[in-house]
Each structure stands twice: as C-alpha cells, then as structure tokens.
Image (tube, rainbow, N blue to C red):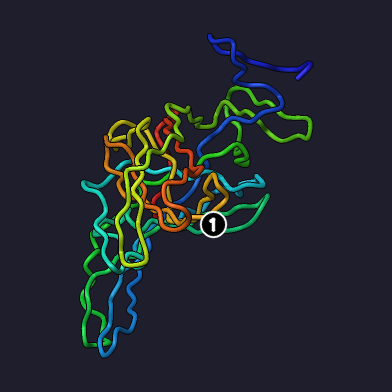
Amino acid sequence: MSFGFAVTNDLGRRVIDESHGLYVVVPATVTREHLQYSEPRGVAYNWYERVGVRITFSRPYLGDEPPMLFMKGNGSHPSEYNQYWYKHFGTMWYNELRYQLFGGPGWWTGAFIGASVYTGWSYSSTPPAKQLTGWDLRSWFMAAGTAAAPGPDGMGAVVFDAGGRVVFNSNDNFIEVQGYSNAWRYLGRSEYGSEYIENWILDGLAVPTSASGHWISLIPFMRYRRYNGEVALAFPGNLTSGQNPQVLVVGGRSGSKFHMPALVVKAKLPISYKYA
C-alpha cells in the first residue's frame, strides 16, 4: 500500500489497510439436524445416528476459498477404535467429524458439520429408539473469514479496497489469533492385519475450554498430503478441552509428516448467531 488508510499496532505490525481484509465472524443461523439410518449386516442391521448442525450464512460469503470453520473444545477421552475403524471411531461425536460446504467460489452459502455414530445392531429393519436425541451441538461451531459480505453499517469506520470490497468495518466481530502450530509429533502406530493406524499429537497447542471464549480450527475427517507427497487419511483422535489435539492417520509411509496447521482464536465480541 503506497497511499490511503492504514493502522499499525504497538508492535509496528499493520493490522488494517486498504488492501488486506481482517478475519471476522461470518453471520449465520444454526439449526440442528438428526438422521437415523441402517446398513445390512448379514441377516441383521447395523444402526447409526447422524447428528450435526447446519450453518446457513445470513449473507453469502464472497471469497474464492470458503471461510474457516472453528469449534469449541469438548469431550473427555481419546478415541476408541476397532476393526470397524472406517465406520466407527468411538462413542463421542467428535471422533468422526465431517463437514460439507454449500455454494461455491465467490458465493458460499453455508456448511453442514456432523458425525455418524454407531448405536448398535438388530435383526429388525424397524428403527430402534434414537439414543442421541439429547445432543445439541449448535453452539459449538463458528465460521470466520476475510470475505464476509458487509451488513447494514452502524456508527464507525469502513475501509474499501481498490475493487470496492469492504476490507474493514468497525461493526464486524473480529477474531484474533491466540495460538498457531503445525508441529505434529509422531507417537507410533497400531497394527490391524495389513492395515495400521498412526497416532500424532500437537504439542504446541492446547484445545481451548468452552468457557474461555476461544475456538480451535476444525480438524475434520479428511485427506491430507504428507511431506513426501503421499496422501493420508486423518481424523480427530482427541479434542478434549485443555489437552493437546491428537489425530489418527491411515495410509502412506508411516511416520512421514503432513501439513495440517491448527489455530486457536478468540472473537472480539460474543458470537451472535441465531439458533433455530
């Protein structure tokens, strides 16, 4: 930036200018979703419950990349996994965390975040009583990014870039990075016949507690590229409040590092989502 408006902090770092947007909470409405389904198992049925939340952005998110998704720390123990690791990673919702984004580049409209949890088997095709009806995860997730469409202006200041896009609005709920790490440490692996599951821990970052007002970037069930070029499947192994995050990794050369940064952030104001 050669001319225009700029603000620097006490460390001399530029925090606002007419070229770079700040991360803000994306306004949204969050609704609860619950689905029960089965899969054949010989003459019986395996029953699952898919529990999650749908985040519908109040205004489309205009970035080419979707906004980042964050969650609060939760849970009380690491994953428990067995020979059905690809279906069922444990008894807590965060152990098979998946998400789906809606919309597309330049016009993202929302996301679904949820988990499929194995709840038992039966010889009957009639659904058993639902077990997870008490789970309400609506307040555990947040979306944030630099391309949130501006809302009605209140009193304050607005900064535009050369293309007319708002890069700063003093009425937005900004988030501040409180911690960052990508230093995952290999703890070893467990053998399952010809397959294995690695365990990795992130020493430099702790999962925030729900009462602290901090959020950690979502670690979903998905594929990541290892530093040696191979692709591995990773899923949360432990996202317990106050502990170091752990992930379980399947595939590729054992012990080869991967790139999966994690952030801890805090919003300037309380999250003002609408919960439907």
The image quadrant where one finds the N terminus is: top right
Could you tell me residue 246's position as x and y percent?
34, 44
The image quadrant where one finds the C terminus is: bottom left
Q: What residue is rendered at 66% in x and 31% in y?
A: 167
Q: What residue is rendered at 39% in x and 58% in y?
A: 114
Label 1 sits on a secondary structure element that is: strand
62 to the left or right of 203? right
Residue under numbered circle 1: 101
Could you tell me residue 204's position as x and y percent?
37, 30
Q: Dot 1, how many residues are within 10 Å of its Cα: few (below 14), some (14-19), or many (20+)?
A: some
Number of numbered discs visible in the structure rendering: 1
Q: Amino acid at mark 1?
A: Leu
Q: What residue is rendered at 65% in x and 44% in y?
A: 63
Could you tell me residue 56's position as x and y percent?
50, 54
Could you tell me residue 234's position as x and y percent?
42, 53
* Quadrant in the picture for residue 179: top left
Q: 220 above or below 128?
A: above
Q: What residue is rendered at 33% in x and 48% in y?
A: 199
191 to the left or right of 249? left
Q: 122 above or below 234?
A: below
